[in-house]
Image (cartoon, coloured by chain):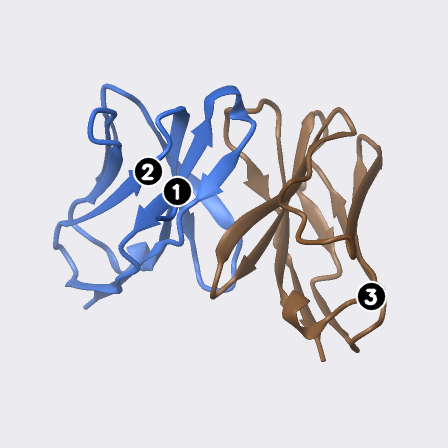
Amino acid sequence: RKEVEQDPGPFNVPEGATVAFNCTYSNSASQSFFWYRQDCRKEPKLLMSVYSSGNEDGRFTAQLNRASQYISLLIRDSKLSDSATYLCVVKLTGGFKTIFGAGTRLFVKA
Amino acid sequence: DAGVIQSPRHEVTEMGQEVTLRCKPISGHDYLFWYRQTMMRGLELLIYFNNNVPIDDSGMPEDRFSAKMPNASFSTLKIQPSEPRDSAVYFCASSDRLNTEAFFGQGTRLTVV
């Protein structure tokens, strides 16, 4: 079993749709959680950190469920520019190990 | 700040040749990471440094790979000898703390033929 698992997709959604991605992690020592975005042939960039209480940044909402060991990302009112690969990132206690999920591809169509 | 700078952006080399990838982290960042990304394996952490000292190199695939950080503003990842299976995009990233955001360079796309 992979330490961080994501549905690779692709998710094909129309503009304006709401889409949600989940990510599960296996190591209970996981301490910090992030969502990164990676455009085609570009470097990954931080989209948002994920806090225990859940957090929102505009159209994006991230949630963490420690009991079930998963994090989620919700995108409301999808834009064409949201098309990208979304990477789930988990850092273990002490930050000694960073694990990236394989990513979920999103295509938003007009 | 110019961000993390990597060179070269693209490298094509023949099997058996030595390849050196370079990275300049963001000034003031104490942590530097080297990652490799392939379609099959995704993004993998190879090694990271703290204050120029290698902390964890457990992700380095084999002895053909080596990394150095002679000073706070420069790091290299060397592959000697290179093999076709080393073909990938190699990213360098830096951060100011271990549990915070890592900023990535634009990557070096390596092709070994």
Chain represented in blue:
A
Location of the C terminus of chain B (image quadrant) = bottom right
Chain letter of the residue beneath label 1 in the structure image: A
State the residue position of label 1: A3
**Which amino acid is tagged 3?**
Pro
Task: Report the number of discs.
Answer: 3
Where residue B60 appears, as percent x and y from the top left, is 67, 48
Residue under numbered circle 3: B81
What residue type is disc 2 on? Answer: Tyr
Which residue is at 53% across, 33% downward? A97
Residue at the spot of label 2: A25
Is there a contact, CB below 8 Å, between mark 3 and mark 1?
A: no
* Position of residue A51 measured from the top left corner of the image (x, y, whole percent): 31, 23
Q: Residue at x 49, y 49 (%)?
A: A44
Which badge, 1 or 2, comes first in the chain's sequence?
Answer: 1
Q: Chain of mark 3?
A: B
Q: Which chain is brown?
A: B
Q: Which mark is residue B93?
A: none
How far is mark 2 from mark 3, CA to CA?
35 Å
Q: Left of B27 or right of it: where is A28?
A: left
Q: Disc 1, disc 2: CB below 8 Å?
A: yes
